[in-house]
Image: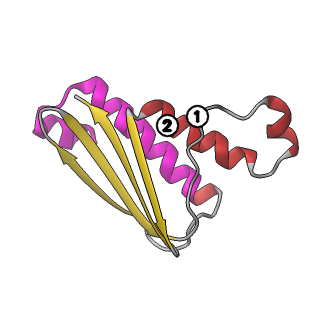
């Protein structure tokens, strides 16, 4: 991300947020077994925004507005999935997620 961001001339703080969101997303997909197939990532940049678009076959990830409370994290096995989605949401300025059967597509946008 840093190398490509430098080639694009993107601001470092935007690239850092996008890299952190991508790391969190990919770790959650793997850790919570949302897919066993490859995850494809496409990145686009213009002078206004950086967009990361992930596509994969599997279960969709939720991106809640609020984080699970400590009790949920201890008692609900799905709470860690929601925590990961919450963290990704905190990094991105905008998220769109579409699920069509097993095909999932997640777009993260970062204002530049």
Q: Position of residue 52 (x, y in %)?
A: 31, 49
Residue 12 percent across, percent down from the top left: 25, 26
Give the label on residue 89, or none: 2
Residue at image location 82% in from the left, 38% down from the top: 72
Q: Position of residue 74 (x, y in %)?
A: 85, 39
Circles 2 and 1, Cβ within 8 Å, touching? The answer is: yes
Magenta stretch: give its range: 1-29
**Label 1, on which residue?**
65
* Main SS class of the magenta portion in the image: helix
- Residue at the spot x=58%, y=50% of the render? 62
Find residue 39 and report its image quarter: bottom left
Quarter in which the C terminus is drawn:
top left
Labels 2, 1: front one: 1
Q: In this image, 32 relative to 74: left or right?
A: left
Q: Is residue 95 above or below residue 47?
A: below
Label 1, residues with CA under 10 Å away: few <14, some 14-19, many ≥20? few
Q: Is residue 87 magenta?
A: no
Color theme of the render: secondary structure
Magenta segment includes 9 = yes
Mark 2 lies on a secondary structure that is helix
Instruction: Give SS at disc 1.
Output: loop
């Amino acid at each position: 991300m840093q190398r490509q961001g430098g080639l694009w001339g993107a601001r470092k703080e935007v690239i850092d947020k996008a890299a952190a969101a991508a790391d969190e997303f990919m770790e959650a997909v793997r850790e919570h077994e949302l897919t066993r197939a490859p995850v494809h990532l496409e990145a686009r940049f213009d002078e206004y925004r950086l967009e990361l678009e992930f596509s994969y076959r599997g279960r969709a990830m939720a991106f809640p507005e609020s984080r699970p409370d400590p009790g949920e994290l201890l008692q609900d096995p799905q709470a860690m999935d929601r925590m990961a989605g919450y963290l990704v949401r905190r990094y991105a300025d905008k998220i769109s997620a579409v699920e069509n059967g097993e095909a999932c597509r997640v777009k993260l946008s970062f204002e530049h």
